[in-house]
Image (spheres, rainbow, N blue to C red):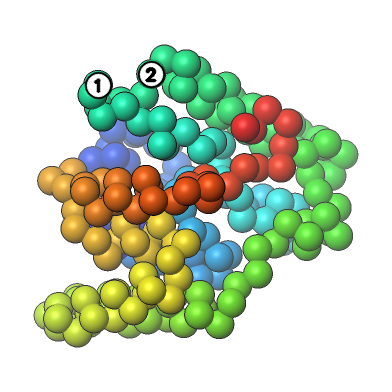
Amino acid sequence: MDAEIEAARPWVDEASPAFVTLIDENHQLSSLYNMVNVPQAVWIDEDGKIVRPTESGGSIDILREFDMEIMGFKPEAMERAAAAKATYTGAVKDWAINGKESPYAFDPDAARDHVEPMTDDMALAHTKFQLGQFLLKNGRENEANELFSECRDLHPDSWNIFRQTSEKMETGIAAGEAFWGKVMSLGDKEYYKTVDMPGMS
């Protein structure tokens, strides 16, 4: 998800994927699957059934352990993050091989229980974000920014909306003072919600 394709291009080029990369400029997937951050994943089987609804795609909540002095994470945090990513990747592979017999695949009732409900305000925020994107692309920046401000108020838990509508760094990422201020003000709330899977904490 990136409102600016060219901002995403360097990351895609560096990864050199062997598959086609799609850029969701208008956050349609965010709207459909109630995604609030990246990376997020939804497991969908061959029959189009959701096996695991939207969840963090292998990331754990270490962001507040970012060390401003070294401008990075300490080795122990990086090791925990790498172990969690390996756990999640292994679970995806297990499901790909074993299908519904995989211990990581939810049955329909469990999958429904893991769906985060979308409120009217959240749905309105997604709609206003897409309208704001249209206005921005058509030279109506002031109107777009007014809508984006409303989006952030309507759906304060959406880091996707916040990062796409806040001031960006030269890299195209919103990781400046406003971002870190919001992160540090989370209190007991998680930046990445814990995934219901052993080894993902």
In what element is the residue under mark 2? loop
Residue type (three-letter) at the residue carrying disc 2: Lys
Residue 7 in view, yes or no:
no
According to the picture, the residue beneath numbered tag 1 turns out to be 70
Up-down relation of residue 183 to residue 147 (above or below): above
Up-down relation of residue 133 to residue 19 (above or below): below
Q: Residues within 10 Å of mark 2 (few under 14, many from 20)?
A: few
- Please name the residue shown 58% across and 65% down the image: 33
Residue 35: x percent and y percent? 52, 60
Q: Quadrant of residue 74?
A: top left
According to the picture, the residue beneath numbered tag 2 turns out to be 74
Q: Nearer the viewer, residue 145 or 57?
A: 145
Q: Is residue 33 left or right of residue 171?
A: right
Q: Are marks 1 and 2 in contact (CB under 8 Å)?
A: yes
Residue 190: x percent and y percent? 53, 47
Please state, as top left, top right, bottom left or bottom right, where the C terminus lies in the image.
top right
How many marks on residues?
Answer: 2
Up-down relation of residue 170 to residue 35 (above or below): above
Residue 130: x percent and y percent? 36, 77
Please state, as top left, top right, bottom left or bottom right, where the N terminus lies in the image.
bottom left
Q: Residues within 10 Å of mark 1 (few under 14, many from 20)?
A: few
Residue type (three-letter) at the residue carrying disc 1: Ile
Between the residue at mark 1 and the residue at mark 2, the CA separation in whole angstroms equals 8 Å
- Please name the residue shown 13% across and 46% down the image: 170
Residue 14 in view, yes or no:
yes
